[in-house]
Image (cartoon, rainbow, N blue to C red):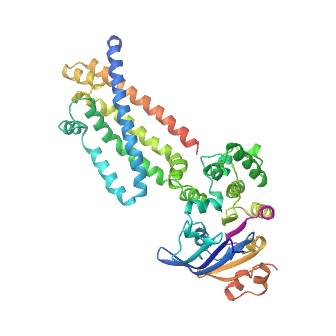
Amino acid sequence: MTGLGAFLWERRGEIAALAGQHVLLVAAATAIAVAVGVPLGVALTRRPRLARPILGAANVIQTIPSLALFGFLIPVPFLGGIGARTAIVALVLYGLLPILRNTHAGIRSVDPAIVEAADGLGMTPGQRLRLVELPLAMPVVVAGVRVAVVVGVGLATIAAAIGAGGLGVLIYRGVATVDHRLILAGAVPAALLAILFDVALGFAEKRLSSRR
Amino acid sequence: MPPILEYVSVSKRLGGRPVLDGFTLAVAEGETVALVGPSGSGKTTALKLANRLLEPDAGEVRVFGEPAASRDAVALRRAVGWVIQEGGLFPHWSVEDNVTALPRLLGWPPGRQRQRAVELLESVGLPAADFARRRPRELSGGQRQRVGVARALAAEPRLVLMDEPFGALDPPSRRAIQEEFRGWRARLRAAVLFVTHDVAEAFRLADRVAVLAGGSVRQVGTPDEIRRRPADELVRGFVAGLSP
């Protein structure tokens, strides 16, 4: 085991650089998934008829094996190709479902009496959303973001297969050269990142729900 | 002077069922009217028509002398106070933020909001020093209800609608808050239309009582008139349990 420690220490520069790329991939994808998923989730609460087909479609995307999705995206113009952009598109598609679903569920879980109180007080629909519904739904929305991030950290390791960089680079190299230490050099930091994000967002979620 | 609030043969169906049918009632400036009736008789529906949370299918609702439908719903609601059971407070806001919700929407300067919150909380028996920073869940039911009243009065509405305002309280706090209500009433220049299923409460607090059944007003009059000359058997039965 000391051998592995020394091995990782020797490659700390490369591991840190790849971990940085990894975090950037996940952060960019999560930011886009939030920017799309939250407004869309809110819109679905206003158009209940669309909720089923759209949540269903997001579910279907979730079932596509990730390696296959990366592969499918490569020939797609603008979104696809080799590199980080394609990986981010794929990660956005996977992150969308938990964020979309939780935003939809979070807004719908707000007590109808509170929503009616906001209307009766004279809030415009925009004020009601911004001042009442979103803040009350926030813990559930953050729970969705948490799932998206943790899943994204894992999936991003596969992104190395299409040349997007990240900790997956070490894992693929380790697999190709049958070097367990290299595989671990990618997998252990990736797992630690996932745990770190999970704990941090779990904490944010708890803080938000205690405010209610 | 035209009534502050007037229903002119209003009909409303909800879920295919007629709830109000030829409902007519007027509330004058500064007057407190209680709307009583069995549950499901359309009392809450009638209230929600007054601030356009619902729209009538037929007939007309007039607020401040003009058709409610002719006014912007948001502007109308800001001009009409609205109190609901348990207060309907925003759980993520402090008591003060709840009370000043409407002044904030109206863009009052912060100093004036703060001052108004202190006045209002004082007037409902919740000293700001103790209560302003608390969250709704840290209050008793009666305290929440008082905050709900304070919130509705924040921008000095000329009309206040109250939906079972004291319904969720246990009898002793209910009694206490009813007594206070008389005090607020004396200070307020607002007209109040309040809905209750508790006939005793209606008779104790209202200048006039309207008995609603089958979608329309069976009788409206002062508590004394209704007690002495109930219009029909239903009204008689309704007030029978009251001590004179």
x, y (%) of residue B24? 63, 80
Against B188, residue A60 (above or below) is above
In the picture, the quarter occupied by the N terminus of chain B is bottom right
- Res. A70 image quadrant: top left
Q: Is residue B134 magenta?
A: no
Residue farthest bottom in this picture:
B232
Who's the residue at 55% across and 65% down the image?
B53
Q: Nearer the viewer, residue B96 or A178?
A: B96
x, y (%) of residue A62? 29, 44
Lateral position of residue B111 relative to residue B71, left or right? right
x, y (%) of residue B73? 55, 63
Who's the residue at 57% across and 66% down the image?
B71
- Res. A208 image quadrant: top right
Q: Is residue B186 magenta?
A: yes
Q: Nearer the viewer, residue B10 or A200?
A: B10
The magenta-colored residue range is B182-198
Q: Nearer the viewer, residue A142 or A173?
A: A142
x, y (%) of residue B233? 68, 88
- Res. A85 image quadrant: top left
Against A3, residue B197 (above or below) is below
In the picture, the quarter occupied by the C terminus of chain B is bottom right
